Image: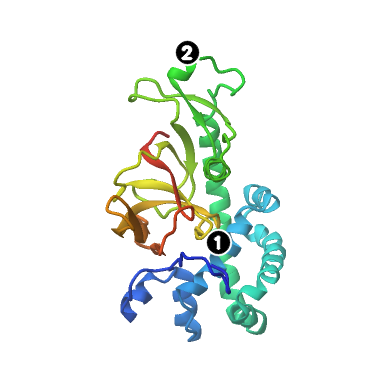
Amino acid sequence: MQKGSSAAIEPISEAGTRKDKEEYARLSEIIKLLNDRFGTDFTEADKLFFDQIEEEMVMDEKLGVQAKTNTIDNFKYGFEDVFIAKLVDRMDQNQDIFNKIMDDRAFAAVVKDYLLKKVYKRLNVEQDVVKEAESFLSDLIPDDEITPDQQKTHMRICTLQAVATSFAEQRTPEVIGWKRLGGIFKLNKDMFIAKVVGKSMEPTITDGSWCLFRPDQGGSRNSKIVLVESRHITDLETMKSYTIKRYFSEKTAGEDEDSFRHVRITLKPDNKDFPDIVLENVQEGDFHVVAEFVKVVG
């Protein structure tokens, strides 16, 4: 939530307290490296600054081409310019790290070397993932060509963002195409396939997996993996207001005997390197379970 917000939900980045040793163990490799070598005391919160710069560089189309066509020694020249630009863009988000990079050449060299290797590796690996995605999508039927009979054996493919935002705005999500899944299990017209990006649900859902979802079924959702949309959520991997996590809820009686309200909703990643998302004092309309994960299909 932003400062000054009066909304009822209060997201918590990590549930409960942690001993110092446990907190240190959860720190990313880059934070451990910097703290050990330079005596700094950066925390898990500072990790987000580096993560966001890394993600923006991985998404840079020009860098993507350069990584695929150059050795890492040549790639570093283009990397340097983009790194400085991204750093300046985010300087207000973490002034301490920005100043340390600008004022300490040794510190800056370690940061740049670490991110150079990470970004170069990811850009090369992820371009291979793109080829795999193209293979998965190679037999798609366009939305305007699908027949009623084919809809019995094919599932629509949408982006998670399209599904989440269309749910909030009460409209039909844009369909990328239709993929044949007949014979796997019983399908229904409201199911959809979407690509899940991020490592927070590994090993259950690996980064880049194509997954089958069905609309929220209501009833108890505890321990189920769900797609959740809320303006009070910011997913650390996508920086969007929706997330895929395992759902747990604590309830209390409502104003009448047949009603209840959520005291606390906890969205847990299967990957313990990621923090829980905790929403407290949940009010109707502030939080939506959009869909339920069914199976990885590609």
| Of residues 18 and 134, the one drawn nearer to the viewer in this rendering | 18
How far from the left and from the top, in percent, is residue 77? 70, 62
- Image location of residue 222, percent across then percent down: 29, 50
Kindly identify the residue that appears in the image at 66 percent across and 57 percent down.
Answer: 75
**Residue sitting nearer the eye, 20 or 122:** 20
Would residue 13 be seen by someone viewing this image from the given angle?
Answer: yes
Residue farthest to the front, as pictured: 256
Farthest bottom residue in view: 39
Secondary element at image label 2:
loop
- Image point 57% across, 31% down: which residue? 175
- Element at badge 1? helix
Which residue corresponds to mark 1? 117
Q: Amino acid at mark 1?
A: Lys
Front in this rendered view, residue 228 or 124: 228
Q: Earlier in the sequence, mark 1 or mark 2?
A: 1
Quarter location, residue 218? top left
Up the image or down, 36 lies above or below 158; here it is below
Looking at the image, residue 182 sits to the left or right of residue 163; the answer is: left
Pointer 2: what residue? Answer: 149
Mark 1 or mark 2: which is in front?
A: 2
- Of the residues shown, which amino acid type is indicated by label 2? Asp
| Residue 114 visible in the shown view | no
